[in-house]
Amino acid sequence: MSMDFQTANRGAFALLLTVGTLSVCWGAGAVVVPYAVPAKPGVEIPASPAEAPPAPPVASAVAPTAPVSGAETGTGAGAGTGGDVAHGAALAQQSCAMCHTLTADAPDTVGPNLFHVSGRKVGGKEGYSYSQALSGHGGQWDDATLNAWLTNPAAFAPGTRMSFPGIADDKDRADVVAWLKTLR
């Protein structure tokens, strides 16, 4: 079966027409919707602690107003049992503030306001609609429950709507818990 000149010519014309049409569409699309690099990324993905740039200073509205005890205001890794409050504040700004507000009287957003979370009933913030898994969990947010929640929310309350994967590092979790306890 051999191809005659007319069939080859038609095939070449169809290919040329397809390439030309795609080029015109691409060029028109580039004019109508020009590519522009965003001024800042939509979501900041925290780098590993070794590669992370220094965290921006925490706004004074987020700073602790009255620490629970003196051990929780330590700044060293082993300060009392509370961990490093300053490091916890920086981690919370990176990880929690995307979905939660952290100041008194701030509205709930994707997640509930975390101000005064320590000591609150699990799934019990007035006015926030929790998942059935969390609202039926029971207990209060103390060091142990906050640690378990921050380790793996899906394991703590299977069926929760919170998609946060958790904080793997024990020290980082202790730092975040120590900082959350200062939000009073």
Image (tube, rainbow, N blue to C red):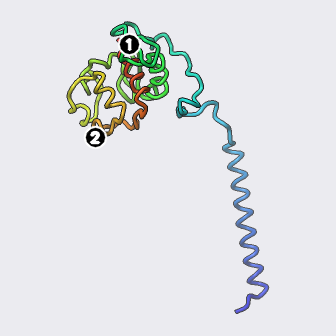
Task: Specify the amino acid type for callout 2.
Answer: Pro
Labels 2, 1: front one: 1
Task: Specify the amino acid type for callout 1.
Answer: Glu
Give the percent coordinates (x, y) of residue 164: 40, 35
Q: In this view, does 160 lie above or below 61?
A: below
Q: Which residue does the numbered mark 2 point to in the structure image?
A: 158
Whether residue 45 sits left or right of residue 151 in the image: it is right
Q: Answer few, some or many: residues within 10 Å of disc 2's Cα (few below 14, many 20 plus, some between 14 and 19).
A: few
Whether residue 19 sits left or right of residue 177 in the image: it is right
**Element carrying mark 1:** helix
Would you identify the image quadrant in which residue 125 lies?
Answer: top left
- The residue under the point 64% across, 30% down is 39
Q: Earlier in the sequence, mark 2 or mark 1?
A: 1
Q: In this view, does 122 lie above or below 165?
A: above
**Is 31 in front, or is 39?**
39
Give the percent coordinates (x, y) of residue 5: 79, 85
Q: Is residue 113 above or below residue 151?
A: above
**Element carrying mark 2:** loop
- The residue under the point 40% across, 7% down is 65
Give the percent coordinates (x, y) of residue 49: 53, 29
Cα separation, mark 2 vs mark 1, equals: 30 Å
Would you identify the image quadrant in which residue 69 lies?
Answer: top left
Q: Residue 72 carries which label?
A: 1
Q: Residue 28 carries which label?
A: none
- The residue under the point 35% across, 25% down is 112
Would you identify the image quadrant in which residue 74 lies?
Answer: top left
- The residue under the point 72% across, 71% down is 15
Quarter holding the C terminus is top left
Whether residue 14 sits left or right of residue 113 in the image: it is right
Quarter holding the N terminus is bottom right
Give the percent coordinates (x, y) of residue 138: 20, 29
